[in-house]
Image: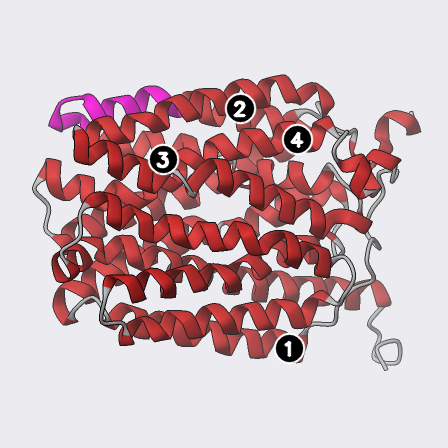
Amino acid sequence: MAARAGISPRMTAARTAGIALFLLTSLNLFNFIDRYVLPGVQPLIQRDFRINDAQAGLLTSAFFFTYMVVAPLTGWLGDRLPRKPLIIIGALIWSAATLLTALVRSYETLLVRHAAVGIGEATFSIFAPALLADFYPEEDRNRVLTIFYLSIPVGGALGYLLGGGLGQRYGWRMPFYVAALPGVLIALGFWLFVREPQRGSADTVQATADRASFRGLFRNPAYWTATLGMAMWTFAVGGISTWLPTFFRRFAGYSVAGAGLTAGEITAVDGLLATIAGGWLAQIWLRRNHRALYLISAWSALLAIPFALAVFFGPARWLLPGAYLAEFCIFLNTGPLNAAIVNSVAAPIRSTAISLNLLVIHLLGDFPSPHLIGWISDRHNLRVGLGATLVSLAVSGVILLGGARFAPALADRDAQG
């Protein structure tokens, strides 16, 4: 039918890939809205349940604990079963768990509920990049994943805004009602309009033993340096994103809504601009240097440190400009670093590799950091607690600089002459 209508198979495949990218990016947007509603209403929850900073941080840590524990199983399934139904099931689970938040009446129930969101999100976060990699070849994945991961800062910002704005006016439960439904509708569209591609159909880099087998994965330095660098970056991002609205409220005198609005604006502006800029710079740099994905990710972490230092420990007049500059630097690596992970392995183990990556980055990153920062804050203050993120950014940069020499040559260009 497509041939009679004058539409080539290549055009049909490109259109299907575009629809998949749009719907998966939309799902990821609401994935992160759901995740960041909680930090937006965190001061209200602390007041309602009378919990300290360590207990508040534990809510986010519980989410990431479930997320990372479920990840290995879902990765194993993703390399053996069709990923399309698994993505839809994950979206329905996290949407239902978000909706059920409105019914909790104790801190302990909220802790369990927020942990349950991690089950749904673990499935989606593993399968979506692996599926997109089967629509697009290696040289295009930085561009495609940059688009896909634009939904992280935008979703985070909207989560802050939704939580702070609606929470202050209607109570902290209302934002969770509003955030739950769109994921269900988008999942339905994905079910109706996207056909899953053949696994590995877009790969061009040779599938060597350490790229295409689970055992070989543990001898793959390109994968492990990208993963460990991302883990240290995630420690910083998880801690900062959880505590930034609270930091604005305590040290700059913002209201709950004002803190959520300010954190949301910074995240949205920086996230959009920096994610686009980082993906664009990496795409240009890749034409000259196949190590570009690692190098731009390393400098992203290192350049953020002096600006974050000004935010946490500098005078009040440095807070907003420092926050804008720090988050801009942090988000430069969103597309490139995720593309480095996807390109470091071949299709037969890609879902497993992404799931192991998620386990490691959350185990070492944003699982411990929110609770640890809250624990330090209870004993000193939130400035000192957030200072721990500066160390993790430095370690991330060093690991990624060292790992750049292991980056695979995309599309076997070196071998082709």
User: To which residue does mark 1 refer?
Assistant: 191
Boundaries of the magenta span: 304-320
Instruction: Identify the residue at image location x=25%, y=39%.
Output: 374
Q: SS at mark 3? A: helix
Lower position in the chain sequence, tag 1 or tag 4: 1
Asked if residue 180 lies left or right of residue 57, the reply is right
The residue closer to the viewer here, 250 or 51, is 51
Q: Is residue 268 above or below residue 392?
A: below
Q: Amino acid at mark 1?
A: Trp
Q: Is residue 67 above or below residue 112?
A: above
Asked if residue 76 lies left or right of residue 384, the reply is right
Q: Residue 221 location in percent, x, y?
A: 72, 26
User: To which residue does mark 3 refer?
Assistant: 327
User: To which residue does mark 2 refer?
Assistant: 298
Q: Amino acid at mark 3?
A: Glu
Q: Is residue 91 above or below residue 347?
A: below
Q: Nearer the viewer, mark 1 or mark 4?
A: 4
Q: How many marks?
A: 4
How far apart are labels 2 and 4 at the CA level? 14 Å
How far apart are labels 3 and 4 at the CA level? 25 Å
Q: Amino acid at mark 2?
A: Ala
